[in-house]
Image: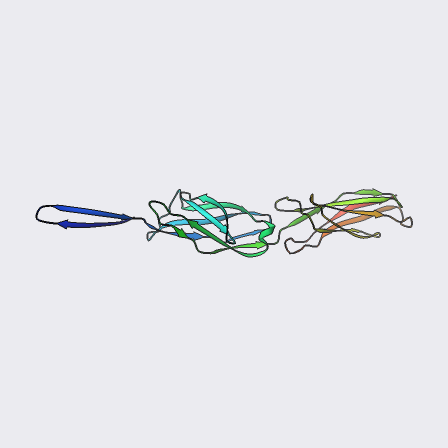
């Protein structure tokens, strides 16, 4: 805090005036790194100026790409921490992070520097199952695609079913993250076991993934 003391003297009295002004502050936002679907911590440190003492118990507002995403209280080290889940809507790339303190009776308001949230493509996982198919009879194969970090199901993604010696088929995941294809194994295909691999080639938001080791038993 800034203190000013001014003394006035006269032959009859002595007066003292103390003027207290609100202290200046500084707010430092930190860079962050994450992937689509991951929850990261947004951090910002509030200090008093010019002595750089940390300020506890103040509310900090965080903005990502210019939009407010929540508030957090500064701790004993002056650090406000806000857990933030990176959504698909944010996209991949370098995104601006800002923070602000509205000020109070003791401290002046302040806006932070512009930090960066680096968003990388999300990791994925795909699973299927062993099945039995009868020649000449329709058989439905399914696979489920998820965000490997958050576990959320991914819709509208193309999944490939590669059956060694039979063919390759493609399905699109629904709202439950499930892709389905219907096959009809020709009578000319020999009975026995065939290897099935399911894969996702990746896109602008997600990395590719594949899973081998599944079997289709043809009868």
Residue 34 in the figure: left or right of residue 169 = left
| Chosen colour scheme | rainbow
Residue 87 in the figure: left or right of residue 193 = left
Q: Give residue 80's position: percent from left, percent from top.
A: 45, 46
Q: Give residue 139's position: percent from left, percent from top.
A: 83, 44
Identify the residue at the far left of this view.
Answer: 11
Most foreground residue, 38 or 96: 96
Most foreground residue, 172 or 185: 172
Vertical arrangement, residue 191 with respect to residue 118, above or below? above
Residue at left 80%, top 42%? 131
Query: How many labels, in total?
Result: 0
Q: Give residue 201's position: percent from left, percent from top.
A: 70, 55
Residue 97 in the figure: left or right of residue 124 = left
Identify the residue at the far right of this view.
Answer: 188
Quadrant occupied by the C terminus: top right
Residue at left 57%, top 52%? 90
Q: Give residue 81's position: percent from left, percent from top.
A: 47, 45
């Amino acid at each position: 805090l800034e203190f000013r003391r001014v003394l006035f003297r006269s032959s009859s009295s002595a007066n003292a005036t103390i003027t207290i002004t609100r202290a200046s502050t500084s707010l430092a936002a930190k860079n962050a790194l994450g992937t689509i679907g991951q929850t990261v911590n947004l951090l910002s440190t509030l200090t008093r100026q010019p002595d750089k003492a940390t300020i506890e118990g103040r509310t900090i507002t965080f903005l990502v790409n210019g939009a407010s995403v929540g508030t957090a209280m500064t701790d004993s080290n002056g650090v406000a921490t806000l857990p933030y889940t990176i959504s698909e809507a944010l996209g991949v790339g370098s995104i601006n992070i800002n923070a602000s303190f509205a000020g109070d009776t003791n401290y002046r308001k302040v806006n932070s520097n512009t930090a960066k949230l680096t968003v990388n493509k999300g990791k994925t996982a795909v699973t299927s199952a062993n099945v039995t198919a009868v020649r000449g009879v329709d058989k439905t194969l399914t696979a489920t695609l998820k965000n490997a970090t958050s576990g959320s199901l991914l819709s509208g993604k193309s999944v490939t079913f590669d059956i060694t010696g039979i063919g390759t088929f493609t399905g699109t995941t629904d709202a439950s993250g499930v892709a389905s294809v219907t096959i009809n194994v020709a009578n000319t295909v020999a009975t026995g076991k065939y290897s099935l691999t399911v894969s996702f080639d990746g896109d602008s938001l997600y990395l590719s993934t594949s899973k081998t080791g599944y079997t289709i038993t043809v009868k």
